Amino acid sequence: MTDFQQHVEEIIALHFDPRWGTPYWLERAPSLPFNPQRDICTVEDLLRFPPFPMYLLSNCPVEHLIPKRFHDDLANFITAETGGATGVPKRTAYHSDDFTAAFVDPFVAAATLMDFPRNRHWLFIGPSGPHIIGKAARACAHALGSLDPFSVDFDPRWVRKLPEGSLGRTRYLEHVLEQALQVLHTQHIGVLFSTPPVLEALAGRLTEEQRMHITGIHLGGMAASATFWEQLTTNWFPNAIALSGYGNSLAGVCPQITPCLDGAPVYVPFGTRIAFAMERNDDGAPATVRFHRLDRAALLPHVIEGDEAFVDVATPPKAQQLGFHATGLRNPQPIQRQHEVRQGGLY
């Protein structure tokens, strides 16, 4: 039995336990066309579940999707929301151990592979809440021996309500940049963690000396273009190791594990708590991203994302030895639908 198979069976047994299982799954089990405890044994079997009804994560109490076994231990759970880019925000919760496995452990393993700087002061420019990215930033900085990050709160939900090029949007970005620059002028910042647009705007405000002092950049929030990657690593912050992550508040993060040389970073799942279910298209086109989240706090099988990616990437042996999967995703991008353009993807 593989580690993945053992983990799948343990998670299914936990969430479908007749006495201590998850309220939602115990209510749903009689209507499923199979017996989960008997018929779900492998990652491939998880596709027998219908696509997960995402509206539940917007409408039901989070404890409805947490096993009853943990309802007396909710103080050890961490809540998270999506940014609401594709509708009403969705909510979930992580047990503290699951949170570490979903966000911190993958980042630390990737940082090891990428020689990401340790023991540096961080500046995080992003949402402090209710998104999980701010909580993850703090935990990841601590894991690399860094001080609690300096931070500037940035509310993407508000920015999305402000028209592109509007005075309100310009003034809000200026407000964020002023705060960030005040930190950078007074503190010895070595690592920046923010979105591509904020990093681009910030690079134009820093002196060459300040830009040369940045040795690490962690990107999140949205996909970045090939032009951005070239500017970031060649012109703006040439002394920095750039490490981005693909994921969201519902799934966790799949980090970049190799340098981005062609503007198309590769992201690889870590451990046994997350699995992607994507098929290569015969025409070589990217495939729709589908994932399974296999946590003690939440079982989310067959989740269909609003992104697409190439899945023909082999993971280097050294990364596999650290716990990364054998294959990864290349250059995930939001699916462009009529009347809907989503900025998506990271955390």
Image: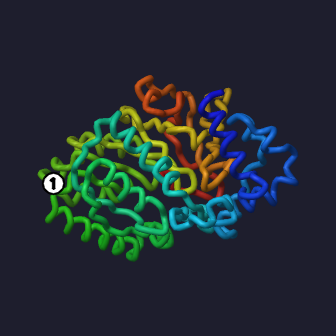
Q: Mark 1 points at which residue?
A: 210
Assign a secondary structure to mark 1. helix
Image: 66 above or below 100: below
Return the residue nearer the eye: 201 or 344: 344
Image: 212 above or below 257: below
- The image shows residue 193 at horizontal and vertical percentages of 33, 55
Q: Is residue 11 left or right of residue 85?
A: right
Image: 84 above or below 243: below
- The image shows residue 310 at horizontal and vertical percentages of 56, 34
Q: Which residue is drawn at 38% across and 63% down?
A: 126
- The image shows residue 147 at horizontal and vertical percentages of 25, 58
Q: Specify the quadrant of the image occupied by residue 197.
A: bottom left
Q: Residue at x 51, y 28 (%)?
A: 313
- For the N terminus, which image quadrant? top right
- The image shows residue 174 at horizontal and vertical percentages of 30, 71
Name the kind of residue labelled 1 in the image.
Gln
Q: How many marks?
A: 1
Return the residue nearer the eye: 144 or 335: 144
Q: Specify the quadrant of the image occupied by residue 41.
A: top right
- In this figure, which colouring scheme has been used for the structure? rainbow
